[in-house]
């Protein structure tokens, strides 16, 4: 519990918060926060630790471990476990941006394929219904244009645009 007090106290100091100010921000009475910091509350709820971690931009996993949730804390032992709430929000924003970028890439490729298919359908109609004579050279030119036009849609997505682990 002494470690929990130290983590919360240091976090408050870094943010310039008194116990009263932090208590108000997380919606508890200041005496409750004082009891948490001083070890009077033996098992602090996970929700309370989450509120504290978010407000002070602390790692929830470190607070959980310091509060005696070591088995629970160990289950989060991966890349994101020791990230603060702000770091996780920033990473989530990166993923959302990359998701939008990927969707935009897919939309452009589908639009391009649809445009190239339209050229082929027009050529097919011209050949099938004999509206006008189509020379072999004209057919080859249209097929070359379609082939060149499809190249951007064939390329793989640039995965380097995806968020990277720090």
Image: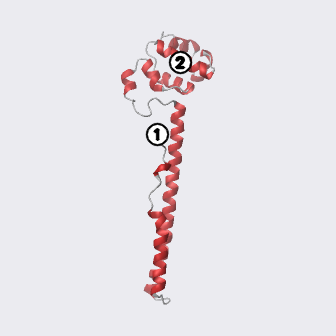
- Given residues 67 and 25, the one toward you in this image is 67
Q: Is residue 136 above or below residue 42?
A: below
Q: Which residue is mark 1?
A: 165
Q: Residues within 10 Å of mark 1 (few under 14, many from 20)?
A: few
Q: Earlier in the sequence, mark 2 or mark 1?
A: 2
State the image coordinates of residue 129 (x, y, percent, origin top left). Answer: 45, 87
Q: Is residue 10 above or below residue 163?
A: above
State the image coordinates of residue 93 (x, y, percent, origin top left). Answer: 54, 41
Q: Which residue is mark 2?
A: 8
Asked whether disc 2 touches disc 1, contact meaning CB atoms under 8 Å apart, the reply is: no
Q: How many marks?
A: 2
- Rendered image coloring scheme: secondary structure
Q: Residues within 10 Å of mark 2 (few under 14, many from 20)?
A: many
**Tag 1 secondary structure:** loop
Residue 122 appears in view: no
Q: CA distance from mark 2 to mark 1?
A: 27 Å
What residue is at 46 percent from the left and 82 percent from the top?
139
Where is the N terminus found, in terms of image quarters? top left
In this rendering, the label closer to the viewer, 2 or 1: 1
**Which of the 4 image quarters holds residue 31?**
top right
- Given residues 109 and 29, the one toward you in this image is 109
State the image coordinates of residue 15 (x, y, percent, origin top left). Answer: 61, 23
Residue 160 appears in view: yes
- Given residues 146 and 165, the one toward you in this image is 165
State the image coordinates of residue 122 (x, y, percent, origin top left). Answer: 49, 79
**Tag 2 secondary structure:** helix
What residue is at 56 percent from the left and 21 percent from the top?
11
What residue is at 53 percent from the left and 47 percent from the top?
97
Residue 138 is marked as none
Q: Is residue 13 above or below residue 136?
A: above
């Amino acid at each position: 519990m002494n470690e929990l007090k130290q983590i919360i106290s240091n976090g408050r100091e870094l943010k310039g918060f008194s116990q009263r100010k932090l208590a108000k921000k997380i919606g508890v009475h200041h005496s409750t926060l004082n009891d948490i910091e001083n070890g009077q509350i033996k098992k602090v709820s996970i929700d309370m630790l989450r509120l504290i971690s978010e407000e002070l931009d602390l790692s929830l996993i470190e607070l959980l471990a310091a509060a005696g949730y070591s088995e629970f804390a160990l289950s989060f032992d991966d890349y994101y476990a020791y990230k603060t709430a702000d770091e996780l929000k920033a990473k989530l924003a990166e993923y959302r941006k990359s998701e939008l970028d990927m969707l935009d890439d897919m939309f452009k490729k589908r639009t391009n394929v649809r445009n190239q298919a339209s050229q082929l359908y027009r050529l097919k109609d011209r050949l099938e219904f004999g509206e006008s004579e189509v020379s072999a050279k004209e057919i080859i030119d249209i097929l070359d244009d379609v082939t060149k036009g499809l190249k951007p849609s064939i390329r793989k997505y640039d995965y380097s645009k995806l968020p990277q682990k720090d």
